[in-house]
């Protein structure tokens, strides 16, 4: 029987090294690196400030 959600094999996106981009935290102004390309007009937060802006999980 064919797997509905096949496991990730060699060459999947998880095998590539993560590309980081430099950004400036919208809260504290500290320079940081993020694993995505920041979008102009959207705030980026450093590791220290991000928890203050996350919605609480229930």
Image (cartoon, grey):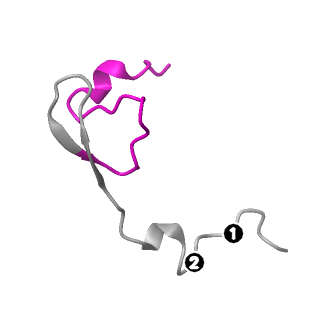
* Foreground pick, 4 / 19: 19
Q: Residue 26 lies in what quarter of the image? A: top left
Outermost residue to the front: 40
Q: Which residue is mark 1?
A: 6
Disc 2: CA contacts within 10 A as few (<14), some (14-19) or many (>=20): few
Pointer 2 residue: 9
The residue positioned 29% from the left and 19% from the top of the image is 52
Range of residues picked out in magenta = 33-58
x and y percent of residue 42 in the render?
A: 42, 29
Q: Reply yes or no: does residue 54 show up in magenta.
A: yes
Which secondary structure dominates the residues rendered in magenta? Answer: loop
Q: Quadrant of the N terminus?
A: bottom right
User: Contact (CB < 8 A) between labels 1 and 2?
Assistant: yes
Relative to 46, residue 36 above or below? below
Image position of 40 with respect to 3: above or below: above
Instruction: Give the residue at x 78% y 63%.
Output: 4
Q: Residue visible at 42% across and 29% down? A: 41
Q: Is residue 40 rendered magenta in the image?
A: yes
Instruction: Indicate left or right for 32 with 14 as reference.
Output: left
Judge from the rendering whether residue 53 lies leftward or rightward of residue 6; answer left or right.
left
Task: Tell me the crowding category of disc 1: few under 14, some 14 to 19, or many 20 or more residues within 10 angstroms, Cα based.
Answer: few
């Amino acid at each position: 029987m064919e797997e509905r959600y096949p496991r990730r094999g060699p060459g999947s996106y998880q095998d590539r090294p993560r590309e980081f981009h430099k950004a400036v935290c919208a809260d504290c102004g500290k320079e940081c690196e993020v694993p995505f390309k920041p979008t102009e007009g959207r705030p980026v937060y450093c590791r220290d400030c991000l928890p203050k802006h996350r919605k609480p999980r229930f």
